[in-house]
Image: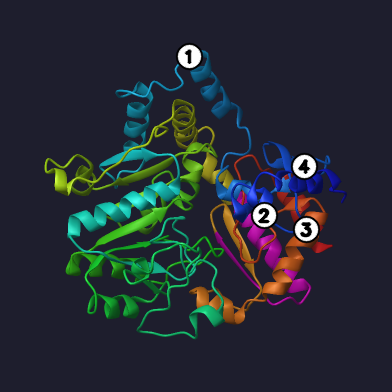
Amino acid sequence: MIRSKSNSLLLENEKWIPGGVVSLNRKSEPNICFKSGKGSRVRDLDGNEYIDYQAGFAASFLGHNDPDINQAVTAVLQDNSILMGAGPTTLEGEFASLFCKSVPTVDCIQITTTGSEATYHAIRIARAATKRDHIIVMQGGYNGWHNDVSCNVISTLEDIGARVSPGEYPFDSSSAGVPKSHSSLVHIVNYNDLASIAYLIKRYEIACIILEPILQNIGIVKPTVGYLEGLRKLADENGFLLVFDEVKTGFRHALGGYQSLCGIQPDLSTFGKAVANGYPLGVIAGKKKYMDYFVHPEKKERVLIAGTFNAFPLTTAAAIATLKKLADPICDVYGHVESLGKMMEEGLRDIFTTKGITHYVARQGSAFCAYFMDHAPVDFHDILTHHDFQFDVTYRKKLIENGIFNFPAAIKQGSISYAHSIADIAETLDKTKK
């Protein structure tokens, strides 16, 4: 494919933006600059069209430029109610009510602009409520860009060493500029490893454990039987908070979040991405006794939440319209994407089996990932030691050249949207065979 315009734009942007991209995790090889998206398809500056499974890092669950969402945003523009900057708004109240009715395991919410801000607030609340400082995060998980969680996202074995259990792994910072004091308060364990959680509880005063209930930063790694139940039990017995980061799992898997599927109620949850179908909005939600730390009567106990653009009217309108569409039985969003996800999963397995390629196709609803290893991964070490990373990248790049786009980095989740069709999945599978 010709991508001269994409490459020229990157070079031009690099004059004014370090790296040429405002979020450097968007940078990839090949470099593709997208111009537009509609439904399940995106088009780059050079006119190349792709069936899109990247979906804005899983944010565009209903598809690009969904007409119902755009109509709701346009209505706000026409109403001349963009940003007042003082007092409550009708939209934020409507969204909060709709959210809590959609996710019955939460009592109340606060609204942020990004998922990272939501996880930041969740950790603050946990520390305020427990009067403790230490937190536990997952090896290979992603919970945002801030100091406490900017670590151990996609580490190498050289960085973190061989598997240990019970125990913890070195703090592998994702960024320079993180104070060393943070690394002493953040403890990294493998997902699905209850023994290591118990090990850390005996050594530190834990404020919370924050995790994606399914690890979707590294594909689709599901909880083993009893794992999430075990976390809930340990939190209750030891006085720390269980925080589910549902920024990715959230409304993509069920209207009530993944917590409604697994039957485990966390103390706090964070949401983003699919909640507003790609418009920038995050949510911190949970039990009232913890959320009320935002309005604690004692100043020294109160957790600050502020943000000029929190519940920005355009994004809040998009979120309201998104939740309404997800709940609409006529649309049957979850039934549709489940059938497409099953078609993709079974089709990929048939293709890889026929071609003699060692594989395991993991899927949860509309989210999928092909691992080039012979079993379902249980944690990041499992992937590091068994997955064929080079083959994965080559596979993704070949698909891109044939008009099928998923981010060209190993073990990145593929995301089917409501806008995808049976014909889209069939075309994807047909091109995969080649």
Q: Which residue is mark 3?
A: 399
Which numbered disc, 4 or 3, marks the residue that appears first in the sequence? 4
Residue 60 in the image: above or below residue 70: below
Which numbered disc, 2 or 3, marks the residue that appears first in the sequence? 2
Where residue 111 appears, as percent x and y from the top left, is: 36, 38
Q: Give the SS element for disc 2.
A: loop
Where residue 240 appears, as percent x and y from the top left, is: 22, 64
Q: Give the SS element for disc 1.
A: loop
Q: Give the SS element for disc 4.
A: strand
Amino acid under label 3? Leu
Q: Which residue is mark 4?
A: 44
* The residue stretch that appears in magenta: 339-363
Spatial CA distance of label 1 from label 2 is 36 Å
Amino acid under label 4? Asp
Where residue 242 appears, as percent x and y from the top left, is: 29, 60
Query: In the figure, is residue 29 to the left or right of 294?
Result: right
Identify the mark at residue 80; answer none if there is no mark: 1
Q: Give the SS element for disc 3.
A: helix
Asked which quadrant contains residue 358, the reply is: bottom right
Which numbered disc, 2 or 4, marks the residue that appears first in the sequence? 2
Spatial CA distance of label 4 from label 3 is 15 Å
Q: Is 382 included in the stretch rendered in magenta?
A: no
Q: Which residue is mark 2?
A: 27
Is residue 430 among the parts visible in the rendering? no
Q: Residue furthest front?
A: 15
Amino acid under label 2? Lys
Spatial CA distance of label 2 from label 4 is 14 Å
Is residue 30 among the parts visible in the rendering? yes
User: Dot 3: few (<14), some (14–19), or many (≥20) neighbours within 10 Å?
Assistant: some
